[in-house]
Image: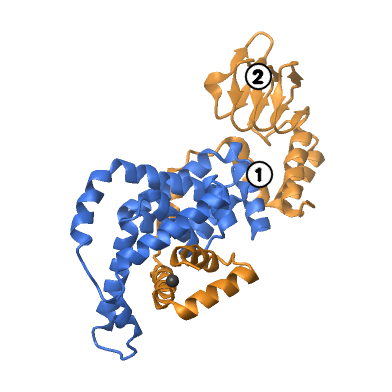
Amino acid sequence: MECRQANVLIHEYLDGDLDELSNQHLQIHLQGCEACRRKLHEFQLAVVYVQSTSHVHVSADFTARVLAQLPTPTKASQFSKWLRHHPFLAAAAVFLVLMTGSLTASWFETDDTLQVSSSNLDKLKIDKERNVVIVPSDVTIEGDLVVRNGSVEVQGQVQGNVVAIEGKVFKASTAQIAGEAESIEAIFDWIWYEMKNIGNDLLPVTP
Amino acid sequence: MEFVEKRLMERAKRGDRDAFAELIEIYKDKIFQLAYRMVGNRQEAEDIAQETFLRVYANLQTYDESYKFSTWIYRIATNLCIDRGRKKRPDFSLDEQVEGTEGLDWYSRLSSSDKTPEEKVVTQELQETVQQALDQLAPKYRSIMILRYIEDLSLQEISDVLKLPVSTIKTRIHRGREALRGRLQFR
Ligand SMILES: [Zn+2]
């Protein structure tokens, strides 16, 4: 075997790719060739040097600094986070709301105005007369679209869930919704929807 | 680990910042390490690591879940490092001429087992020499050598991160080893 050929095998050997037969050929060459033996050893050393570089650590306030730069969270996500941290309180709150018999009172700031939560508000069209939020056919909305006190008409694409609280979700034939489309027609359902999400989060998903 | 990351991703996707903070905690040192070895400078490496996590956050909704999270984040970080290096190219070539002239007898230094008072200095010097040898590699080789030998990724994982065939990764590792051997100037 020539040294050039041996060099190819040396690299394969270092990658753990060498089959038994080629390995034998290489060993025979190495026994008779000092230069290739040296080379193999130097490759191994180069790798050890790179591996031995000390592990560097990022500064202690790194995570806090990144978090401080994130965009402010939406109402819906703040609410679901609150529920996640206080599941028992949330259950108690549902109970309390039922007991007082006033489903619409004081749980949310209750007004009947149309509310929209989306990261792409500028791309949405709003039909005030019909109280409908429209995702036009040439538009892609990133993330969830949540509408309260109105309906949603999806003609274009939504990359998250579409939720209409106290309203309906209408899908045009051109609509593409990556997540789920849900209409929630009472506050109680809305709470149930959030609770269900928490459940999803706690239960392992079977692949 | 993969399962934990998947759950954290799903929570982060729904706007849960605590979940995102946990993902940062898991990956911050790995990503910083990659950036530091790519650019050779703490401040710049922190900027790149920070930018990596901000991009991850901005793209959570479009994340393709058939990818491993680690593959995705390494890909974002590697691309940022290579872009950064491209802008700074003239500085690098100036350094090369100076550093290339050094001939250091690392082999004998490492193999001598006596502990000298200068041992710490020698270790420090070795670190710098390895960093210089890495700096002198072209970014497409440097990134692969770092992913393979510092981040400890398999050839298949590197192929996923860079979206290049395993055969290409192997060829570059071979060339990378040849170049490092030359740069470290063993005797
Ligand atoms: Zn030979």
Looking at this rendering, what residue extends furthest in the bottom direction? B114
Looking at this rendering, what residue extends furthest in the top direction? A129
Vertical placement of A183 versus A188: above or below?
A: above
Q: Residue at x 68, y 56 (%)?
A: B3
The orange one among the chains is A
Which amino acid lies under the numbered mark 2 shown in the image of this protein?
Gly
Q: Is residue A101 left or right of residue B167?
A: right
Do the residues at discs 1 and 2 belong to one chain? no
Which amino acid lies under the numbered mark 1 shown in the image of this protein?
Glu
Q: Residue at x 67, y 15 (%)?
A: A132
Using the rendered view, name the quadrant where residue B5 is placed: bottom right
The chain holding disc 2 is A
Q: Colour of chain B?
A: blue
Q: Quadrant of ligand 1?
A: bottom left
The residues bearing labels 1 and 2 have C-alpha atoms spaced at a distance of: 23 Å
Circles 1 and 2 in contact, beta carbons < 8 Å = no
Q: Which colouring convention does the figure follow?
A: by chain
Residue A104 showing in the rendered view: yes
Q: Is residue B174 left or right of residue A77?
A: left
Viewer-nearest of discs 1 and 2:
1
Residue A122, position as x, y percentages in the image? 52, 20
Vertical placement of A129 versus A11: above or below?
A: above
Pointer 2 residue:
A156
Mark 2 residue element: loop
